[in-house]
Image (spheres, rainbow, N blue to C red):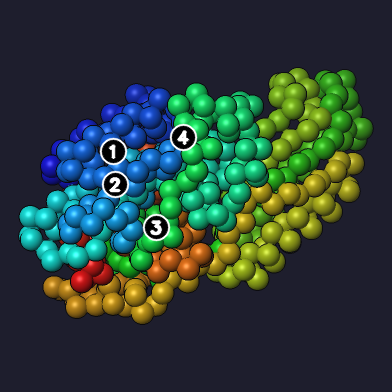
Amino acid sequence: MSFERMWRDLTPVGRDQHSGGYFRQPWTSAETELRVWFAEEASARGLDLETDGIGNLVAWWDPAGSGRRSGLLTGSHLDSVLDGGAYDGPLGVVSAFAALDLMRSRGDAVSTPIGIGVFVEEEGSRFGIACLGSRLATGTMTWSSAQELRDRDGVWLPDALADAGLDPSRGFVDLSGVTAFVELHVEQGRDLVDRGAAVGVASEIWPHGRYRFDFHGEANHAGTTRMEDRRDPMLTYAMTALAANKQARVAGQRATFGRVEVTPNGTNAVPSHLVAWLDARGDSEASLAALVGEIERQGVDRAGRDGTHLTVTPESVSGAVHFDSDLAARIAADHEGGAWPVIPTQAGHDAGVLSAVGVPTAMLFVRNPTGVSHSPDESADTADCLAGVDALADTLARLAR
């Protein structure tokens, strides 16, 4: 039941032969195959598997045989961004199984159940809401709101669930008995590389959000329409994207337009409508609000000069998450070779959702030699992954005692 064997099993699932990236969107064949893999790994270890109405999974190890489905929780997610990397999410799930194997082989004294969890649609790559599975499980998003979501192909969320054989009327996993949550994740940056450390502990998650920018103009002929007669939303968008880049650089924050849809999307036509999604992140909620506000102000100003119109709609906004500093320090301290570094992250995670509802939460990071993430080039050395398994096992053993 080694880490390496499990990683080999997962490597081909959802991988594109041309780019080498992964397409593991929720409630698709690749993600379904991964959930079957998870169930098989849980069964091989004699774990009690819990599945809810949207595909969230928890496999419980109850060493005392109490029958409880409550206690420590670890795990991550199995879905990916479009053309994503192998490690973002699955590393935490594979490491959780490997850490459990290690704890058992060492004979660690564990008196509380430990669950290995998988939350669906963490990336928000299909229905646009990051951490959708954990939001529904914690009650921070209601099903009445979620059922109105559609993917970019127009498929409603309830229909996608039905096609996957799931029924949300069964409800969601019960997290009320979770005493602590520990998520292991590949680092999405180079902090650990710069520090020369294989493993780190999270101190906080920056506030972040996704915002829909609708640029409205007037469709027209690309050849016969004089430049001065155009109401071209593409020009307004282009200036707004440049403004976002400049404002984020000046303020030391993050702003990315990574997705665009153009209507009518013809080579010889001036567009009538362009939708662009902004991903923005700041080191504080005030910084985030100021950044997005300035980008919107400059976009509206440019729209006035272009004869176009801009509306901005926040679609998913998460506040700052400050992980329990005492818990982070306790986890990081007193290891062979010294304490693990405690570092911030700019990426969102299910751990942030659980932390926001009061669950004591911690994150472990495994060094990423390139710092590249959400890309086929995302990577981690096997030796560092195994160090992460040891770190997760030690952390769970500490908390279980």
Q: Residues within 10 Å of mark 1 (few under 14, many from 20)?
A: many
Q: Residues within 10 Å of mark 2 (few under 14, many from 20)?
A: many
Q: Who's the residue at 73% across and 61% down the image?
A: 293
Query: Label 2 vs label 3: CA separation?
Result: 30 Å
Q: Which mark is residue 38?
A: 1
Q: Which quarter of the figure is the N terminus placed in?
A: top left
Q: What residue did someone put label 2 on?
A: 59
What amino acid does circle 4 point to? Answer: Pro
Q: Earlier in the sequence, mark 2 or mark 3?
A: 2
Place of residue 162 in the rendered image (x, y in percent of width and height, measured from the top left)? 52, 26
Q: Nearer the viewer, residue 243 or 201?
A: 201
Q: What residue did someone put label 4 on?
A: 26
Q: What residue did someone put label 3 on?
A: 189
Q: Earlier in the sequence, mark 2 or mark 1?
A: 1
Q: Which secondary structure, mark 4?
A: loop
Query: Label 2 vs label 1: CA separation?
Result: 9 Å
Q: Earlier in the sequence, mark 4 or mark 2?
A: 4
Residue that lies at the very extreme toward the right in this rendered image: 229
Q: Who's the residue at 65% across and 71% down the image?
A: 286
Residue 355 relative to residue 371: left or right: right
Q: Earlier in the sequence, mark 4 or mark 1?
A: 4
Q: Which secondary structure, mark 1?
A: helix
Query: Label 4 vs label 2: CA separation?
Result: 19 Å
Q: Who's the residue at 82% across and 52% down the image?
A: 300
The answer to whether the residues at label 2 and label 1 have Cβ atoms under 8 Å apart is yes
Residue that lies at the very extreme toward the front in this rendered image: 66
Query: Label 1 vs label 3: CA separation?
Result: 28 Å
Q: Nearer the viewer, residue 53 or 249?
A: 53
